[in-house]
Amino acid sequence: ATPAALTAATGRLAQAGLLVTRGHALETLASATDVVFDKTGTLTHGRPTLQAVKLLVADTGAGDETALRALAALLEAASEHPIAHALREGIDTTGLVASDYTNYPGGGVEASMGGQRYRLGRADFVATFCSAPLPEEAQGWRDKDTVVWLASATQWLAGFALGDAIRPEAAALLAQCEGLTTHVLSGDALGPTQAVAQTLGIAQLKAAALPADKLSYVQALQAQGRRVIMVGDGVNDAPVLAAANVSVAVGGGAEAAQAAGDLVLVGKLTALGEGLQVARQTRRIIR
Ligand code: ADP
Ligand code: MG
């Protein structure tokens, strides 16, 4: 690559909000075959808000909605996940004390309060902890939303439905990705992942993916000779970003993801589309 052409392209992209942090990034971008998007915080705002609460225990006073919302907020006290922010929003936990916080990336959180241990997160994650089966009335509840469940070791207590809007410029970005095979990869459940894929016309999807599943998904594509652009944010995406042929860390995300990014997106999503265009043009000039 001629340094002058690359420098000019890099400058143009920085103005649009796409920072090139690794020299090979533009050339790899131009020759990519697939683009894989993380859902939460990438295609969506990643700022979910609480939409509804489902109580799974009789209202005994101790198990009422206010108390369970406070418990959920408390369990999330040590988490930086967007879901944690949403569950803490506007909740007063004064006087409540939890301990022994454990964070399970892609699953949820666990902590102790009042001598009891609780889990909060994905249904399958909570199901491996709670000895009771998920109550029938909970199954399929708000399946287009992201639902996290709260349980003790013996009892399912409540579900929290979180809504997270698709970024307005995501559709334009998908149009700019024409010619690439598109994928969405999410730790979230199938319902909300499908809803996003359908709205944006994304061809392939994998839901309920743990960080290790995201990594093997991209590696499986590479084993077929595909060259993969991975676009993601968050600590959980750092391994898969590192494995991709070219990684795009969405700005404002965790530092680990930024460190893993060959490109860092600090502007709108559509700056990545400009990046694709500039990369293809630059390659034409260089050759
Ligand atoms: P995505 O791939 O969509 O960005 P993540 O991998 O960050 O999603 O999380 C996947 C799922 O794990 C979430 O949808 C949620 O069900 C659960 N989860 C992860 N972290 C938390 C948390 N702090 N509190 C509750 N649930 C969580
Ligand atoms: Mg995410």
Image: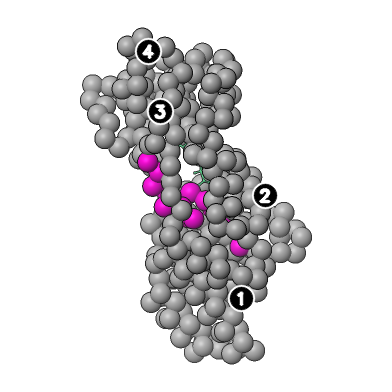
Mark 1 residue type: Ala
Q: CA distance from mark 1 to mark 2?
A: 23 Å
Q: Nearer the viewer, residue 274 or 10?
A: 274
Label 1, label 3: how many angstroms apart (C-alpha)? 46 Å
- Residue type at the position of mark 3: Val
In the figure, 82 relative to 101: above or below? below
The answer to whether residue 266 is magenta is: no
Q: Which label number is shown at residue 232?
A: none
Q: Are marks 4 and 2 in contact (CB under 8 Å)?
A: no
Magenta span of residues = 35-49
Report the side of 242 relative to 78 (left or right): right
Tell whether circle 2 marks a residue whose Cβ is less than 8 angstroms from ligand 1.
Answer: no
Whole-Å distance between the Cαs marked 3 and 4?
13 Å
Sort mark 3 into few (<14), some (14-19) or many (20+) by Cα contacts within 10 Å: some
Residues at discs 1 and 3 in contact (Cβ within 8 Å)? no
**Residue 53: numbered disc:** 3
Eye-nearest disc, 1 or 3: 3
Quadrant of the frame with the C terminus = bottom right
Label 3 and label 2: CA atoms lie apart by 34 Å
From where the camera sits, is residue 284 visible?
yes
| 60, above or below 74, in the image | above
Residue of label 1:
30
The disc, 4 or 2, on the residue closer to the chain's N-terminal end is 4
Q: CA distance from mark 4 to mark 2?
A: 44 Å
